[in-house]
Image: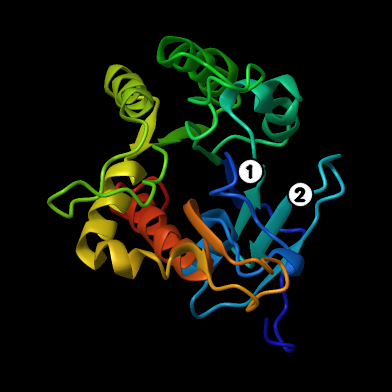
Amino acid sequence: MNSDSIIDLNKSKQTIFLIGDSTVQSYGIGSEPQAGWGQLLMRHFALDKSYIKYHPESTRFGQVVRYESDDLIIDNRAMAGRSARNYYDEQRAEDAIKEVKKGDIVLIQFAHNDANKAKAERYLTPADYREFLINKYIEPVINKGAVPVLVTAIAMREFDDEGKCRISFPEYRDMMLDIADQNKDKVKLIDLGRLTAEFNTRIGPLGCKSIYLHLPKGLFTSFPDGSEDNAHLQYNGAFAYAGLVHDELVRQKIIQK
């Protein structure tokens, strides 16, 4: 932020709320270079503008980060290790949605943890996932006069024998596509799973190591033993994927830029 810039905190502004998991979450300095795409989204909206970031006092959840420019707020409520189930059970959904006002936008991305059968507190069958999204997230957001935007889970760094990146969690993605198709007048969709898979295919398996958490041993204090993580993002990937989200919000006219 430029030191001579002034952000009007009292002005009523449209807010983009982000609800999701570790691939969306904002991370602190101690976790670098790990980042979530929600952490970098404001960078794309405020390329030539100043903005501030802070923890809003209205929430009891410490990982929440709010990014605010003179005309927009991005409120990142995403949390690592959460599925649609345990995010709701921990009252994180309630905490976020109580802040939503008419005209706001609520982006919802889950599936990475919902598909984990080994963790009962997270797991949802695809059918239950669909019902959870509708009843616990979409309907409450619509009732607030806001726009729910389903975001399919980002692709993992997984390639087939022909060098094509696979779309991750396809059964859960299909549920989001079906909900959006059945509720076109009320629910929007960003197929980030497809977009990230296409992006990964273009840069290839080796190129993807620079955007996922593939880190050498001893380079980062937060990852002293290095990392070969094909699910989570480092800064480059988070910035690139945030750009895909930004472009879809603008292209679909979900937000007026």
Residue holding disc 2: 63
Above or below 155: residue 169: above
Residue holding disc 1: 78
Q: Residue drawn at (53%, 26%), measured in percent from left and top?
A: 116
Instruction: Give yes or no for contact between labels 1 and 2 (Cβ–Cβ under 8 Å).
Output: yes
Instruction: Name the quadrant of the N terminus.
Output: bottom right
Amino acid identity at mark 2? Gln
Please tell me in which quadrant of the rendered image residue 182 appears. Answer: top left
Q: Which mark is residue 87?
A: none
> Does residue 209 appear to the left or right of 224 in the view shown?
left
> Does residue 121 appear to the left or right of 118 in the view shown?
right
Instruction: Please state the total of marks drawn on the protein image.
Output: 2
Question: Where does the image place residue 87, in percent across and percent down from the top left?
Answer: 67, 28
76 or 235, nearer to the observer: 235
Question: Where does the image place residue 9, in percent across and percent down from the top left?
Answer: 76, 62
Local packing at callout 1 (Cα closer than 10 Å; few below 14, some 14-19, many 20+) is many
Q: Is residue 8 visible?
A: no
Q: Please tell me which of labels 1 and 2 falls first in the chain.
A: 2
> Does residue 185 appear to the left or right of 36 in the view shown?
left
Local packing at callout 2 (Cα closer than 10 Å; few below 14, some 14-19, many 20+) is some
Instruction: Name the quadrant of the C terminus.
Output: bottom left
Please tell me in which quadrant of the rendered image residue 193 appears. Answer: top left
Element class at badge 2: loop
Amino acid identity at mark 1? Ala
Element class at badge 1: loop
> Between marks 1 and 2, how big is the CA–CA gap?
8 Å
140 or 158, nearer to the observer: 158
Q: Residue drawn at (68%, 52%), measured in percent from left and top?
A: 12
Color scheme of the displayed model = rainbow
Above or below 70: residue 164: above
134 or 200, nearer to the observer: 200
Q: Residue drawn at (51%, 22%), measured in percent from left and top?
A: 138
